[in-house]
Image (cartoon, rainbow, N blue to C red):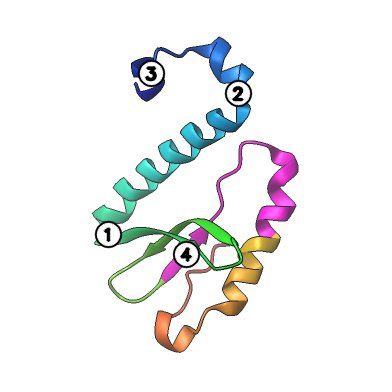
Amino acid sequence: MAVAALGRGPTQLLADLNATGFFFENLVVRDVRIYAQRRGGHVHHWRDQNQNEVDIIVTLPDGRWAAFEVKMNPADTDKAAAALHSFAAKVDHGKAGPRQHSG
């Protein structure tokens, strides 16, 4: 709906993949927020002074958390995984709680 409200369609989305990526990321954040809220969780974004960032951080009431990068291009997967590992290494688990591991 956001794309249509801006008077955009497939032609414009394909012509500006950067903007399309932002639309996609926002849709993913919206969906993750819906699932997180059902568990009492919250969705956050993180960026440090060096412009390192994580697209989505979900925190749950019991202190567990998980971080996610949103990418449309499969070629960006390794870079996103490296960024998540770097982020996780910087987290003070004594303050933030244990991270949620996925299989």
| Residue of label 3 | 6
Image point (48%, 84%), residue name: 93
Mark 1 and mark 2 lie on one chain; the one further toward the N terminus is 2
Disc 2: which residue: 16
Q: Which residues are magenta?
A: 65-81
91, above or below 39, in the image:
below
Residue type, mark 3 in image: Leu
Earlier-in-chain disc, 1 versus 3: 3
Q: Is residue 30 left or right of residue 21?
A: left
Quadrant, the N terminus: top left
> Disc 2 on helix, strand or loop?
loop
Q: Quadrant of residue 85?
A: bottom right
Q: Secondary structure at mark 3?
A: loop
Of badges 4 and 3, nearer the viewer stands 3
Q: Which mark is residue 66?
A: 4
N-terminal-most mark, 4 or 2: 2
The kind of secondary structure element at disc 4 is strand
